[in-house]
Image: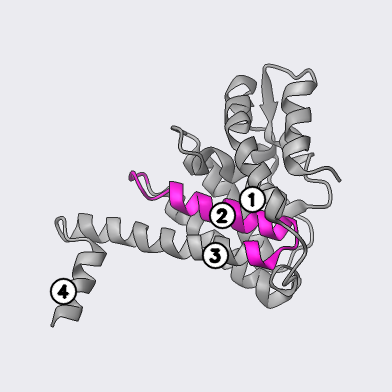
Amino acid sequence: MAKLSVELNRYFFEEERQPKVTLAEILSLAGERTFGFLFVLIAIPSALPIPATGYSIPFAIVIFFLAVQLVIGRQRPWLPAKMMNSSLKLETTQGFIKAAIPWLQRIEALTQPRLTGICTSVPGQIFIGTAIALMSISMMIPIPGTNTLPAIGIFVTGFGLMEDDGAISLAGLVICLCGAILSISILVALVWGGSSLLDMIRGWLGR
């Protein structure tokens, strides 16, 4: 199968499309790459440093749904008809894809099958699925700062999963950890009146 960047460029820019594209049409590109492909594709709008107002929460719900399926050991993803038939404006989707392709090409240049057990073993998939599910929950929080880094973590982890590259997936999991720390810090700051989690940790260490 062609590289993801090539496939997306062909589908969204070289072929004629309707004014709106459904999730089912986008997911048809997955082929045998299934879960990893879907995590990458659906995380793109929130992972990019451009506004994705209104997309993070519905996309995060889809990601969570897929992550749970990965954890319970499904070989092929399944989504309800309502999700599959939801649509996006073609112009909006093309904007996300155009911005994402250079990043995809950079990661593609680094990927190769290695440490494949992380991506293919049952424990590895459970761990990856759990991390992605937690990051998708963070993406659902309607507070600035709680969705971009978790989405980047999902994007990179999913890319490694798609390419059977355990090293890339591990890098994505590290980003997920950083995203979790950032999200928790923001929530703690709101609850404790401006004191971030990092400030509290510094205080505890100082004692």
Q: In this figure, which residue is indicated by the disc labeled 1?
A: 39
The answer to whether the residue labelled 1 contacts the one labelled 2, judged by CB atoms less than 8 Å apart, is yes
What residue type is disc 4 on?
Gly
Q: In this figure, which residue is indicated by the disc labeled 4?
A: 203
User: In this rendering, which labeled residue sits more in front, label 1 or label 3?
Assistant: 3
The answer to whether the residue labelled 2 contacts the one labelled 4, judged by CB atoms less than 8 Å apart, is no
The answer to whether the residue labelled 1 contacts the one labelled 3, judged by CB atoms less than 8 Å apart, is no
Q: For the residues marked 4 and 3, what is the alpha-carbon distance in whole angstroms?
A: 28 Å
Within the image, what quadrant is residue 69 found in? bottom right
Q: Position of residue 205 (x, y in %)?
A: 20, 80
Task: Classify mark 4: helix, strand or loop.
Answer: helix
Q: For the residues marked 2 and 4, what is the alpha-carbon distance in whole angstroms?
A: 31 Å
Q: Which residue is located at x 35 percent, y 47 percent? A: 145
Say above or below: 116 vs 94: below
Circle number at residue 173? 3
Q: For the residues marked 1 and 2, what is the alpha-carbon distance in whole angstroms?
A: 6 Å
User: Earlier along the polypeptide chain: callout 4 or callout 3?
Assistant: 3
User: Earlier along the polypeptide chain: callout 1 or callout 2?
Assistant: 1
User: Earlier along the polypeptide chain: callout 2 or callout 4?
Assistant: 2
Q: For the residues marked 3 and 2, what is the alpha-carbon distance in whole angstroms?
A: 8 Å
Q: Is residue 194 left or right of residue 144?
A: left
Q: Is residue 203 left or right of residue 33?
A: left
Within the image, what quadrant is residue 30 found in? top right
Q: Which residue is located at x 28 percent, y 55 percent? A: 186
Q: Nearer the viewer, residue 62 or 148?
A: 148
The answer to whether the residue labelled 4 contacts the one labelled 3, judged by CB atoms less than 8 Å apart, is no
Q: Which residue is located at x 53 percent, y 56 percent? A: 153
Tell me, yes or no, whether the highlighted magenta stretch contains residue 1. Answer: no
Say above or below: 52 vs 162: above
